[in-house]
Image: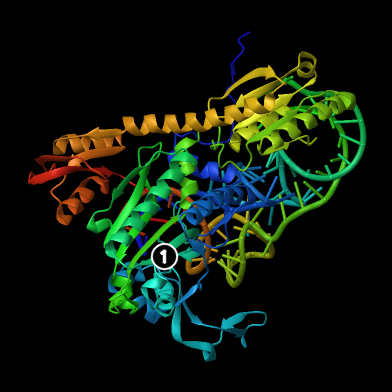
RNA sequence: CGGGGCGUAGCGUAGCCCGGUUAUCGCGCCUGGUUUGGGACCAGGAGGUCGCAAGUUCGAAUCUUGCCGCCCCGACCA
């Protein structure tokens, strides 16, 4: 008998990736217990397991923001329409997808008992927009907070919900309401603001790569893909298993657009009035969608140990109460050592499901490590340890099991990253002709690295023909003379195209 | 907004064409018992405005009309 065994191939209710990738994704979210559809179109319920995952991500990001000098605050959900209008590009960018509050009261319907109607008497003088993002309401406040260079830089983050009335929604990837963080900073100089926007991009990349085990490409967006109101948009782009790219985070250099729109000036040391320079940056619950699509398989979720709500689960195996007591005792010792080692662990000794059912359940939920302990193990001084990422299991001595699992969790984290990186790197195709381009996009998927003439028109036409967009111009991109893959015009560098979420 | 699909118990479904006692089956749930090394079994039990409304009919889950909701694919986007 080999010391390492593969899990048996179990039937489950998941649609397999190869049959219907979109359905596989939905099944995973629902059956993995991350979220549910809600009664409101386009909005989802984030269930405890999914929220625990978000909390872990949030806690780590929050720590990173604070380490880089940011503080948290909270601004209103509602933005007066006139505020949103102030920065023109911004207003145009979001107008199409805003939820609007027009009244502040309901009343009993005089014609239908038990029904409520909007009270026409309670119309707001000025409509309130449910924030699609908070630049407008925040910059209105910053105007009063910033007077002198001594007030700068102002480094504020907020954790909040926002609403964007999307035509078509998908669990976590695009919902009408979602949770995110948005950083909004003000600086004395353009250089400092750019440095901030880049710094936060690196923070995001660090988080996504080291905690979510998901490699990203850092870059800047083309003018077409830029955030409404920004001078430069930085992004991190990740690759999903179906070969589509997903923007995992963005950071914007806003120039003085918002300072001018909201009249935010400061006095320099030389006693001169200057407009401040701004950035904003955000990541959202969309990251959960990225996580799911990056690592999971046909057996269920696969979660990286560093952010998994549960890192290990222990399943007892026994016949009768005497054995159960024996196993319990052994498990309690192991639990204590795992907890002491900082591992989050659950002992599932519920009697309403048998071991096999529990195994499948925790595989579906993506718990990185499973420990099974039965009388035979106790007799032999071992425990059975199964790892979710490779679906392997083997017996290891129960002595020192905490250290073993700790090391295993690190190895799983590393393995998930390596696996995703290998896939990502194998999915970047360099092409030099339009035929190669089309073939790569339609047949292989992934990123296509190609010369582009730098015009928005070419970008648009490529999108029309292939549905591929320019995901980014990588940071520190290698300069290389060539000709645009579409127009044949001269180009100085390659950019990355892909079909995207 | 276009195209497709679906709406019957918590979930998945049969029945609908061709109207007729008490609406089918499985999972799950409750009670008791036996079980427990990869999704256990036996016995008993609870659970339903058949999406909503109107119509046809002696009689509607089933036929007609209207409406509502959700999902998937596309146009818009993080």
Q: Residues within 10 Å of mark 1 (few under 14, many from 20)?
A: many
| Quadrant in which the N terminus of chain A is drawn | top right
Residue drawn at (60%, 10%) of the image: A2
Quadrant of the rendered image containing residue A245? top left
Q: As displayed, is residue A33 above or below residue A14?
A: below
Residue A175 or A224: which is nearer the viewer? Answer: A224
Q: As displayed, is residue A62 above or below residue A136?
A: above
Which residue matches tag 1?
A: A184
Residue A328 or B40: which is nearer the viewer? Answer: A328
Q: As displayed, is residue A41 above or below residue A92?
A: above
Q: In this view of the protein, can residue A354 be seen by the observer? A: no
Question: Residue most toward the left?
Answer: A489
Q: In this view of the protein, can residue A406 be seen by the observer? A: yes
From the top left corner, tell me how far across and down residue A440 is, in percent.
24, 35
Q: Chain of mark 1?
A: A
Residue drawn at (71%, 36%) of the image: A340
Give the side of residue A213 with respect to residue A186, left or right: right
């Amino acid at each position: 008998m080999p010391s390492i065994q593969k899990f048996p191939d179990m039937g489950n209710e998941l649609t397999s990736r190869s049959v219907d990738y979109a359905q596989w994704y939905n099944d995973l979210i629902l059956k993995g217990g991350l979220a549910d559809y809600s009664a409101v179109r386009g909005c989802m319920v984030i269930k405890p397991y999914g929220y625990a995952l978000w909390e872990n991500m949030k806690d780590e990001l929050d720590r990173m923001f604070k380490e880089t000098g940011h503080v948290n605050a909270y601004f209103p959900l509602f933005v007066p329409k006139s505020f949103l209008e102030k920065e023109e590009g911004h207003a145009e960018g979001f107008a199409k997808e805003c939820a609007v509050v027009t009244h502040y009261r309901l009343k009993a319907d005089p014609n239908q008992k038990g029904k409520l109607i909007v009270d026409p008497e309670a119309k707001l003088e000025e409509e309130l927009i449910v924030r699609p993002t908070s630049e407008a309401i925040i910059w209105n406040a910053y105007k009063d907070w910033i007077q002198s260079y001594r007030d700068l830089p102002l480094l504020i983050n907020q954790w909040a919900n926002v609403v964007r009335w999307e035509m078509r929604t998908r669990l976590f990837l695009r919902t009408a309401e979602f949770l995110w963080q948005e950083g909004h900073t003000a600086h004395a100089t353009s250089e400092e603001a750019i440095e901030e926007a880049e710094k936060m991009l690196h923070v995001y990349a660090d988080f996504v790569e080291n905690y979510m085990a998901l490699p990203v490409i850092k870059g800047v967006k083309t003018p077409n893909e830029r955030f409404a109101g920004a001078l430069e948009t930085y992004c991190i782009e990740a690759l999903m298993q179906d070969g589509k790219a997903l923007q995992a985070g963005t950071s914007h250099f806003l120039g003085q657009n918002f300072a001018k729109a909201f009249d935010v000036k400061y006095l320099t040391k030389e006693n001169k009035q200057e407009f401040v320079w701004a950035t904003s940056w955000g990541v959202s619950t969309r990251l959960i969608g990225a996580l799911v699509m990056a690592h999971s398989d046909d057996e269920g979720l696969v979660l990286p140990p560093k952010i998994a709500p549960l890192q290990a689960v222990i399943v007892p195996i026994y016949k009768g109460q005497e054995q159960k007591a024996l196993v319990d005792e052994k498990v309690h010792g192991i639990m204590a050592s795992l907890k002491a080692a900082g591992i989050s662990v659950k002992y599932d000794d519920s009697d309403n499901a048998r071991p096999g059912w529990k195994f499948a359940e925790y595989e579906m939920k993506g718990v990185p490590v499973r420990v099974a302990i039965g009388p035979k193990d106790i007799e032999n001084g071992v425990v059975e340890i199964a790892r979710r990422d490779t679906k392997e299991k083997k017996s290891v001595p129960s002595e020192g099991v905490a250290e073993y699992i700790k090391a295993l969790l690190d190895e799983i984290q590393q393995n998930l990253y390596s696996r995703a990186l290998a896939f990502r790197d194998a999915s970047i195709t360099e092409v030099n002709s339009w035929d190669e381009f089309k073939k790569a996009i339609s047949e292989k998927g992934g990123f296509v690295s190609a010369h582009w003439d730098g015009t928005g028109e070419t970008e648009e036409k490529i999108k029309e023909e292939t549905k591929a967009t320019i995901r980014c111009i990588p940071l520190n991109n290698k300069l290389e003379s060539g000709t645009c893959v579409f127009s044949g015009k001269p180009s100085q560098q390659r950019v990355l195209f892909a079909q995207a979420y």
